[in-house]
Image (cartoon, coloured by chain):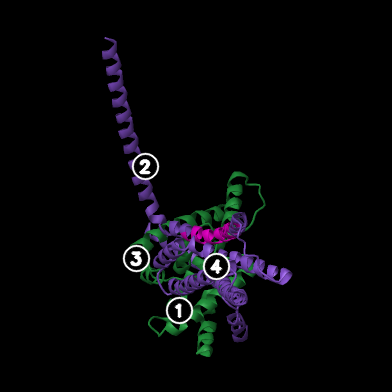
Chain colours: A green, B purple
Amino acid sequence: MKKRFLEDIELNQGILHKIVSIYENNPEDKKDLFQEILYQLWKSYPGFENRAAFSTWMYRIALNTALLRQRKKYTSREINRTYFQEKIQNPGVEDKKISLHMAIDQLNRIDKAISLLYLEQKSYQEIAEIMGMNKNNIGVRINRIKKQLKKVLEYERRK
Amino acid sequence: MNEENNHIDENLFHQWQQESENNSQQLNLTEMEKLLKKASSDFSGSIKKTLKLDMIFKLCLMAGFLFILFLYMDNSFVLFTSTLFILTGLICLAAENLFLKGIGQVQSMERGIEDLIRDELKFYRSNLIRYPVVLSVSIAMFYALGSMIYHAVKYGYVNPFRDVTDVIVLTSLMLLGIIISMAANFPFFRSKINNLESLLKDLRNEDDFRIREREIKLKKQITLALFILIGAAGLIALIYIILQLL
C-alpha cells in the first residue's frame, strides 16, 4: 500500500509544491510543510477508498494541513505588505519584480487556498467541494480575489 | 466587462503557469519515503509527544510512590501522600488518555475546513485549563517523591511531618510548582486557539461586512436608548428639584 501511495504522490507532487510555495517562503519551512502534508496524506490514505478523484482528495488534505499549521510570528504576508506600503509612499524604494506569488501573499489564508484552486482552473463546484464551502460564497470570494490581484498586476504593468 | 474579466483570467492563468514552472521541483520516491519516516511536526504532534512522555514519567513516579509506601507503610505521612499521589496519577493518566484519543478524532483532515476549525476550537477550548493542570501535577509528584526518597536515604527514615507549619510549607511549595508549570504550558495551548480563531475570522471574511454593519446599528440603538434614559432621568430629577424649591 505504501508503494502505491508514494507512486500516486510522485505523479501528483506538483500540487503539493504549489501549495507549499504559497504558504511558506523559507526553504526550510517549505520542506517542513511538505513533510507534514505527506504525513497527513499517508495517515488518511487507508480511508481514501477511491471515493473521489485522487487529486481532489489530495488538494483537500494538503490545503487543510497548510491552513491549520501554526502561524509564525512574522509571516511573509506582513513583510510583503510592508514592502507594498513603502512602494506606494516612496516610489524610489528598491524595485523588486512583483510576482503573482507576492500578490497572493497579500490574501488571507482561506483566500490563498481559493486563489490557488482558481488559478489551477478548477470550477467553482470543484473548489466548493475541496474547501467544504458554499458554491455562492466561493464565487463572491473569487471575484474579490481577482480584483485584488488585478490591482497588483496593473501596478506592475504601469511601471 | 465579461471580455475584460476573461482577459484578466487569461493573464493570471498564464502568469501562474510561468511562475509555477520556474519554481517547480521534483522529489523522487526515495526522498519522499525518507520524509514519510519522520513523525508529524505540527502542533498536535508536539502535544501527543509531550503527553506520552508525561504519561511514562507519571507511571515511573507512581511506581516510586508504591515502592516507598511498601517500605514505610507505618509512616502516616508516607501513607497519606503516596496514596493521594497514586490516585491523582491514575486520574491524570485517564485524562491524558482521553485527550490523546480526542486529538486523533478532531484531526481528521478529510473534512471541510469550517468543520475542522470548529471541532478543533471546541476541543482545545474545553481543554485549555485541563491540559496544563494535568501536566503540572507531575511536578508536584516529583517534588513529593524526591523529598521522601532524599529523607529516607539521608536519615534512614521519612519525617512524618506532624507539625502544621511543615505541612503548610510543603503544600505551598508544591502548589507554587504547579502554578509555575501551568503558566509555562498555558501560552502554548493558547497560541493554538488564537491561530484557529484567526483562521475562523479569515473564513468569515465574506460575512464580516454584514456583521460589522449589524454591530454598528446595534451600538447606535443602544447609545440612543441610553441617551434617552439618561435624558429622561435628568429631566425628572430637574423637575423634582424645581418642585422641591417651589
Chain letter, disc 2 residue = B
Question: Where on the picture, by quarter, is residue A26?
Answer: bottom right
Residue denoted by label 4: B80
How far apart are labels 4 and 2 at the CA level?
A: 59 Å
Q: Which residues are magenta?
A: B175-196
- Distance in Å between CA atoms under marks 3 and 4: 63 Å
Label 3 or label 1, whichever comes before in sequence order: 1
Label 1 environment density (alpha carbons within 10 Å; few <14, some 14–19, many ≥20): some
Same chain under badges 3 and 4? The reply is no
Q: Is residue A75 visible?
A: no
Under mark 3, the amino acid is Lys
Q: Chain of mark 3?
A: A
* Residue that numbered label 2 is attached to: B216
Eye-nearest disc, 1 or 2: 2
Under mark 4, the amino acid is Phe
Q: Quadrant of residue B164?
A: bottom right
The x, y position of residue A116, in whole percent, is: 48, 67
Q: Percent x, y for residue B111?
A: 40, 72
Same chain letter for marks 4 and 2: yes
Main secondary structure of the magenta stretch: helix
Q: Which residue is mark 1?
A: A55
Q: Is residue A116 visible?
A: yes
Dot 4 crowding, Cα within 10 Å, few <14, some 14–19, many 20+: few
Residues beneath discs 4 and 1 located on the same chain: no
